[in-house]
Amino acid sequence: MLPYATVEAAETALGRSLTAAETLWLNYSAHKSDYFLYCHNIIFLFLIFSVFPFYYLFLEHFFKKFVGPYKIQPKVNLSFSDTLRCYKSVMRMFFLVVGPLQLVSYPSIKMIGIRTSLPLPSLWEITAQLGVYFIVEDYGNYWIHRFLHCKWGYEKIHKVHHEYTAPIGFAAPYAHWADILMLGIPSFVGPAMVPGHMITFWLWIALRQIEAIETHSGYDFPWTPTKYIPFYGGPDYHDYHHYVGGQSQSNFASVFTYCDYIYGTDKGYRYQKKVLEQLWERMKSNQEQNGVLHDISAQGHKVD
Ligand SMILES: [Zn+2]
Ligand SMILES: [Zn+2]
């Protein structure tokens, strides 16, 4: 709860006028407890898990011809009932594990030093902190995920997430409860190292899940803004990890590509990409040659 109830009291305490965003935040949060504000994450996550995968489902069903060329595994098509089964399972896990985890993890947030007070962080501060959170989480996630691919970890825990060899957006949080708990730990390490404002924390949790949904969407759209993020893995990168399945010792990182590159766990993926590119080039040159022969024979017929 903020230590000032009115704009005037806040301006006196800060010694300056409040910005429009700060006034908005004060009006919204002044009489709400920090715990209640933290629990907003439950609603945000529920909305993100429900709405964002639906965007891909909508495109697949109503704009199939338009998005079809960008489908990574075009031969695999899940039925609506299979998609619904996935969503129901994710929601069950959400209400049994993710939601309660949010409710009880509040002391760790207090201990870390996530603040709700004024002044609000600048856009630059938010961006820099989010950058740190993504890099730190990606590194921790890489090693936990890699551990989960050992024989025991895979058979006992991680196999559930790999049920989808051609992932869909709804399958991003589809996992064993222990998988969710273990891979959730690195999400708190970045904020613990560089504590920020509650708004930054909300953004962090939301953006990380949106990123996971995009990564599992099964579509590699050329217009997505994430294409401009350096070393970003994206859907094609993680799709390969699911495609190879249980034997996969490649593409463990959740967000970026640098960990797999440094530790040499992207070789299978790079090799497959190279072979596919060569195949594509060969097909293109064959088509061009056939086109030239066709033109010559057509001209020959005209002369005759
Ligand atoms: Zn995996
Ligand atoms: Zn996955």
Image: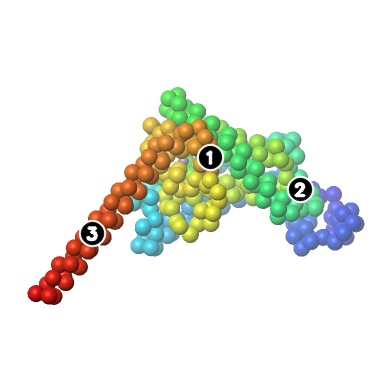
User: In terms of image quadrants, where is residue 296?
Assistant: bottom left
* SS category of the residue bearing label 1: helix
The label number, if any, that marks residue 116 in the structure image: 2
Crowding at dot 2, Cα within 10 Å, few <14 / some 14-19 / many 20+, comes out as many
Amino acid on which disc 3 is placed = Gln
Q: Name the spot of residue 59 as percent of width and height, x first.
A: 42, 60
Q: Which residue is mark 3?
A: 289
User: In terms of image quadrants, where is residue 95?
Assistant: top right
Q: Name the spot of residue 244 as percent of width and height, x first.
A: 37, 37
Q: Residue pushed farthest top?
A: 152
Separation of disc 2 and disc 3 at Cα? 66 Å
Q: Name the spot of residue 272 as percent of width and height, x first.
A: 36, 41
Q: Which residue is mark 1?
A: 258
Question: Between 139 and 5, which is closer to the camera in this rendering?
Answer: 139
Crowding at dot 1, Cα within 10 Å, few <14 / some 14-19 / many 20+, comes out as some
Q: Please indicate whether residue 273 sits to the left or right of residue 141 in the image.
A: left
What residue appears at the point 80 percent right and 53 percent down from the top-left corner? 119
Vertical relation: 207 (above or below) 260:
below
Question: Between 292 and 122, which is closer to the camera in this rendering?
Answer: 292
Q: Please indicate whether residue 247 sits to the left or right of residue 139 in the image.
A: left
Q: Nearer the viewer, mark 2 or mark 3?
A: 3
Total numbered labels placed on residues in the image: 3
Q: Name the spot of residue 298 as percent of width and height, x first.
A: 16, 70
Q: Nearer the viewer, mark 1 or mark 3?
A: 3
Q: Please indicate whether residue 246 sits to the left or right of residue 301 in the image.
A: right
Q: Is residue 53 visible?
A: yes
